[in-house]
Amino acid sequence: MPIIEVSDLTKQFRVFQRATGVMGGIKNLFIRRYEALRAVDGVSFSIEKGEMVGYIGANGAGKSTTIKMLTGILVPTSGRIVANGYVPHLDRKRYTMGIGVVFGQRTQLWWDLAVQESFHLLRKIYDVSQAKFDERMEEFHEVLGIGDFLRLPVRKLSLGQRMRCDLAAALLHQPPLLFLDEPTIGLDVVAKESVREFLRKVNRDMEVTIILTTQDLGDIEELCERILIIDKGKILYDGSLEGIRNRQGREVSLTVDLKEIPPVAALERILEGNGIAWTALGGRRFRAKFNRDDVATAEVVRKLAGAFQIHDLIIEEPGIEDVVRRIYREGSL
Ligand SMILES: Nc1ncnc2c1ncn2[C@@H]1O[C@H](COP(=O)(O)OP(=O)(O)OP(=O)(O)O)[C@@H](O)[C@H]1O
Ligand SMILES: [Mg+2]
């Protein structure tokens, strides 16, 4: 049985249409015109226990709105969510006892309290025993190193320190479900790595099911076997990272430095009919672009080496950034 089941989920906002100019300003006072905006538009997916799923999409695609509905903060316009056995917005109180939530953009800790005070309050709210609490704090300190700033008020923490505290706070009560909305936003490379390491551990050792949104595709590459891509409120893709790479065609770019300068036509002749496009990049450097489905990379290299003396060679595949950029831009796969 999936731990999260979402069917045909829609969230519509009423957005105020503002008229411009002086007359418009006056009009705005008397006539309010609203337009419907479908931030989430018929989204369906299900998530099994223990999965770590990346929920990605361009700015404004509907990620945060989905997460807010999944956590019970927003009420869906239509459609249905069952998570951890509850309908989030209906069973809010009981449901929230079994989930952890981190919104990278803002903290759930009390701004003026020392971190440890916030944790003590959360311990009470979630009814965690002192022994369990101590044990968990020990664990969090080991991986996240939060012990060093427990005495500081939250407002004095750096972004990275605060994020680590927020993560610990979200997991204090050992929820089976964790929702993260941009948990690595603004973190430096070291802090990012420790957050990722922590999430891996939480997912693997504690079997916490995790859904995370992020603009950092490094998070996805390092953490998620499965991704959902949302665009203008609709799910464009549900599958593995490898899956979208393959769908995009398996284009390879091969750059060679030769010991001579042959005409491009000479290069074109060696593997004719395989759809290889050659470009002279200046000097002894040439680039071939081809599709791995049409010709094997090894074959190209072998023929090339048979005909010319190669000084250096670089083989590149489009990175996940390239692939995803194209999807965001075109709104299709
Ligand atoms: N409370 C609201 N009232 C009206 N419109 C809203 C509200 N919240 C979100 N929206 C709109 O819904 C759309 C989706 O917003 P959402 O915050 O879900 O995007 P997102 O995918 O999280 O984007 P980002 O990557 O920028 O965080 C946007 O067009 C946004 O302006
Ligand atoms: Mg968002």
Image (cartoon, rainbow, N blue to C red):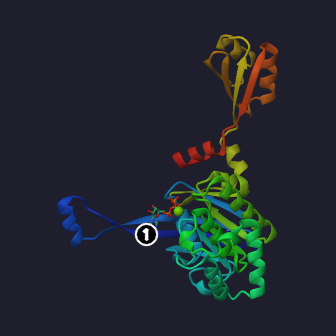
In the image, is residue 331 above or below residue 296?
below
In the image, is residue 135 above or below residue 57?
below
| Res. 296 visible in picture | no
Where residue 308 sits, quadrant-wise, is: top right
x and y percent of residue 40 in the render?
52, 65
Is 332 left or right of 222, judged from the image as shown? left
Is 46 left or right of 71, judged from the image as shown? right
Residue in the image at 52% along x and 69% along y: 10
Front residue (pair 179, 259): 259
Residue in the image at 72% along x and 86% along y: 128
x and y percent of residue 251 in the render?
68, 35
In the image, is residue 254 above or below residue 325?
above
Secondary element at tag 1 = strand
Residue annotated with mark 1: 13
Is 231 left or right of 54, judged from the image as shown? left
The answer to whether mark 1 is within 8 Å of ligand 1 is yes
Where residue 261 sits, quadrant-wise, is: top right
Circle 1 Cα neighbour tier, 10 Å, few/some/many (<14 / 14–19 / ≥20): few
Is 116 left or right of 202, judged from the image as shown? left
x and y percent of residue 59 in the render?
50, 56
